[in-house]
Amino acid sequence: MAETTHNSGLLTVRLVTPDRVLVDTTAEAVELPAIGGYMEALYGAAPLLSELGAGEVKLHGGASSNAKFFVAWGFVEVLPERVTILAETALRPEEIDASQAQAQLAAAHEDWNKAGDSMEAYEYARAEIRVAEEKIAASKDR
């Protein structure tokens, strides 16, 4: 009988942006904002590829020290032993400038009001509002 190796039940988690690797650690669970809402990945999960929304990634257990990060747009790949998050934007809570996020939110609301009949302008403004609101929420978790 072949000997099987028992994994510790920890996921390898990588959070990557175009310009840096923000996280390369282990965790028992990963909560993240998929485009359709929040989801949680656990060790042994079925493979999944999803579009990433805007919001907070929360790592639980393992070497992660229950870390939190703001992310916006990209993709996430969940495999039984690994979660890879490819984000356009990813920040630690302490890297978020709350006053800048408030200004971004005000500008996005102005864009919303000016969108008129342009569905493209409306969708862009809606996405920017979501990013700004999620940044503000994440900055309060410091």
Image (cartoon, grey):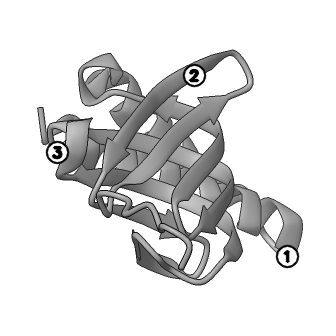
Identified by mark 2, the residue type is Val
On the rendered structure, is 33 left or right of 47? left
Q: Residues within 10 Å of mark 1 (few under 14, many from 20)?
A: few
Element type where label 3 sits in the image: loop
Is disc 3 in contact with disc 1, using a CB cutoff of under 8 Å?
Answer: no
Q: Residues within 10 Å of mark 2 (few under 14, many from 20)?
A: few
Q: Earlier in the sequence, mark 1 or mark 2?
A: 2
On the rendered structure, is 82 left or right of 115? left
Residue at image position (73%, 67%) is: 122
Where 142 sits versus 118, above or below?
A: above
Between marks 3 and 1, how big is the CA–CA gap? 44 Å
Q: Earlier in the sequence, mark 2 or mark 3?
A: 2
Between marks 1 and 2, how big is the CA–CA gap? 40 Å
Q: Which mark is residue 66?
A: 3
Percent from the top left, x then y, of residue 130?
49, 58
Identified by mark 3, the residue type is Asn
Percent from the top left, x then y, of residue 51?
70, 67
Q: Which mark is residue 97?
A: none
Where 111 sits versus 103, above or below?
A: below
Q: Which residue is mark 2?
A: 21
Corner quadrant of residue 98? top left
Element type where label 1 sits in the image: loop
**Observer-nearest residue: 83 or 141?**
83
Q: Is residue 51 shown to the viewer in this render?
A: yes
Residue at image position (22%, 35%) is: 139
**Observer-nearest residue: 125 or 85?**
85
Q: Which mark is residue 117?
A: 1
Furthest toward the front, the residue is: 1
Q: Report the quarter where the C terminus lies.
A: top left
**Observer-nearest residue: 54 or 20?**
20
Q: Residues within 10 Å of mark 3 (few under 14, many from 20)?
A: some
